[in-house]
Image (tube, helix red, strand yellow):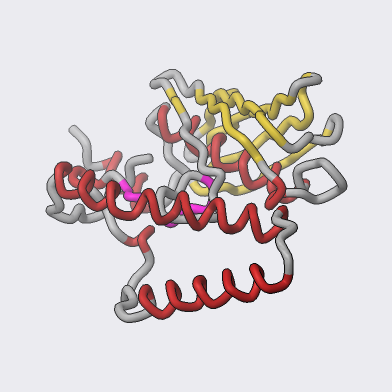
Amino acid sequence: MNWPFAADDTPASVVEEEAAVWRPLAEAARELVDLCVMSDVDEAEVRAAQADVEAAVARLRKVRRTQTLGQEHLTAGRRRPWGNPVIGLRNPIAPPLEVHSRPDGRAETDFHCGAAYEGPPGLVHGGVVALILDQVLGHSVGAAGRPGMTGTLTLVYRQGTPLGDLRVEAWIDREDGIKTWAKARMIGPDGVTAEAEGVFILPRAVRESLSRRP
């Protein structure tokens, strides 16, 4: 999603080098999160693992950022959403999703939700379902050139969303001034599990940027 903020001057090649360093750490931490839920090793192994994790925390704590990753931007104002809880490359709580979108506002993603996202037994937590749908809806409006902040989000849960492989599809429904309506659905192995409609509001900075265009 593009935002009209000042871009940093980090070359794309450097960004890729950074990604190659941080992506494996996040993937390992993501597996650790899953195993904190699913592992059944004995107490001695748990204690040993805790010591290993605490040692890793001590290493990473040596230098802490002064601002969040979401406050950084790539060249041309493209946000670097590495801390995002749904798509963040560096965020171990993100599944993460890789969303594919088109200029007509269609967006789609196939992804996996494991045990860390469980709400009711064997099902994805309803709040996680809402989080993911909201994210993909945002990609839809952003791809259509109308990036916005969520004004309202309405969900209908058709059936439980099972843990495992899932899909989300989103599209633009209509536009009116600074508002864009988009719809989405989450799909499991037995069909649609949830539907969402979001109203997205063009931020003031975006409106001002658009008004200055010739």
Question: What residue lies at 29% left-to-right and 48% top-to-bottom?
Answer: 19
Quadrant that contains the N terminus? top left
Residue 104 lies, with reference to residue 143, above or below; the image says above
Q: In this view, does 111 lie to the left or right of 57?
A: right
The residue shown at (58%, 26%) is 170
Principal secondary structure, stretch drawn in magenta: loop
In which image quadrant can residue 72 be found? bottom left
On the rendered structure, is 153 left or right of 73?
right
Quarter of the image containing the C terminus? top left
Image side of residue 82 versus residue 179, left or right: left
- Residue at the spot x=63%, y=52% of the render? 34
Q: Nearer the viewer, residue 11 or 49?
A: 49
Q: Which residue corresponds to the image point at 74% horizontal and 57% vertical from the top-left?
A: 40
Task: Say whether residue 6 is magenta.
Answer: no
Residue 89 position within the rendered picture, expressed as x and y whole percent measured from the top left: 41, 48
Frontmost residue, 177 versus 151: 151
Q: Nearer the viewer, residue 47 or 86?
A: 47
In the rendered structure, the answer to whether residue 93 lies left or right of residue 213 reads right
Rendered location of residue 185, percent (x, y): 68, 27
Q: How many labels does the image show?
A: 0
Task: Tell me the magenta residue range.
Answer: 79-86
Is residue 85 a member of the stretch shown in magenta?
Answer: yes
Residue 18: percent from left, percent from top = 24, 52
Give percent across and percent down for residue 157: 82, 35
Above-or-below relation of 63 to 145: below
